[in-house]
Image: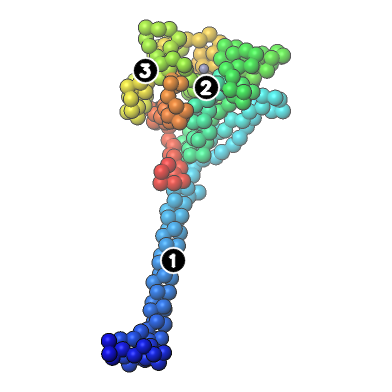
Amino acid sequence: MSNVKWTQNSYFNYSSPHYISFNTILYCSLMLLLVLSIFIISTTQFMFFKFERSNQTVNPKNIYTQFNIYLIGEGTEYETPYYVFKGNNDNPIVLIEAGIHGDELAGTFALDKLLYKINVHAGTLILFPRMNIIACNSNKRYVNKDLNHIFPGDPNADLHELQLANEIFEMIGKLKVEYLLTLHESKYLHNPLKSKTFGQTIIYGVKPKPSYLRKWLNLVNQLSVKNEEMFSSYYFPVENSSTEIMVSEYNLKGGFCIETWKGFDMERRIQLQTNVILAFLDTIEFKYSLIKFMESD
Ligand SMILES: [Zn+2]
């Protein structure tokens, strides 16, 4: 320590290795600044790169879809939108409708989410999330009449459900729908020994049983985690329902009701409804992709 001179001069004495010189501090500061700049630039570039990467998945060049919004009941109290996605050709034409019962909303929310993610390459996909929007907004099965039992409705009736049923019936004919899925929910998990237990079923109401139903069930059940989540098919015709009337009137290639069980929480039911929809599209070899906005999507 005898050599160390704790003086102002020696502190700045460049020649002595024991002391930190002003130039060393300057040099270290510059190096620190350089390292910091490199870090900031690389982080920004990484973010930019990530943005570019995620942007690539929604590159407009890769989007085949023509997208249009239409209204049912325009100007009425039951006005509600449906969304038409068209790919490079019109067929097949698939309509997925939900909210026919206003207290069965997992399918409605599944369609809301799908709206932002679906990219249709070929064919036409129509999403109709809130068929009875007044009932959906009040979380009730229906207001005056059960919409699922009054098809084809009546354009001159006073009750909004009868007018609405008629507009939906006309719309399905006009759009030349080939496949129809109606999304429902049930309080009861399906038990083949108990009637009116619909939870976790794919219901068809017109025989013969469509041949592709087996493939569809296999695909969707690969995504089920618990035994209770497994879907099964169920023959249960409902007179004047949205599905059966359309199948027989318009000679659809397929018409089904999808029922999730309300015993699961809402988030899981939305996922289960989505699984059934996507498994159906895969079964009929509908050409689509899902847009990824984030890695977690
Ligand atoms: Zn229902």
Q: Residue at x 44, y 51 (%)?
A: 54
Query: Mark 1 vs mark 3: which is more N-terminal?
Result: 1
Q: Position of residue 193 (x, y in %)?
A: 37, 7
Which residue bears the numbered disc 2?
A: 104
Q: Is residue 140 above or below residue 28?
A: above
Which residue bears the numbered disc 1?
A: 40
Identity of the residue furthest to the front in this view: 2
Q: Quadrant of the N terminus?
A: bottom left
Q: Residue at x 46, y 55 (%)?
A: 51
Q: Quick one: 59 or 193, which is closer to the camera?
A: 193
Nearer the observer: mark 1 or 3; the answer is 1
Q: Residues within 10 Å of mark 2 (few under 14, many from 20)?
A: many
Q: Is residue 9 above or below residue 77?
A: below
Q: Position of residue 263 (x, y in %)?
A: 43, 21
Q: Position of residue 170 (x, y in %)?
A: 62, 20
Which residue bears the numbered disc 3?
A: 232
Q: Residue at x 49, y 31 (%)?
A: 110
Q: Position of residue 163 (x, y in %)?
A: 67, 17
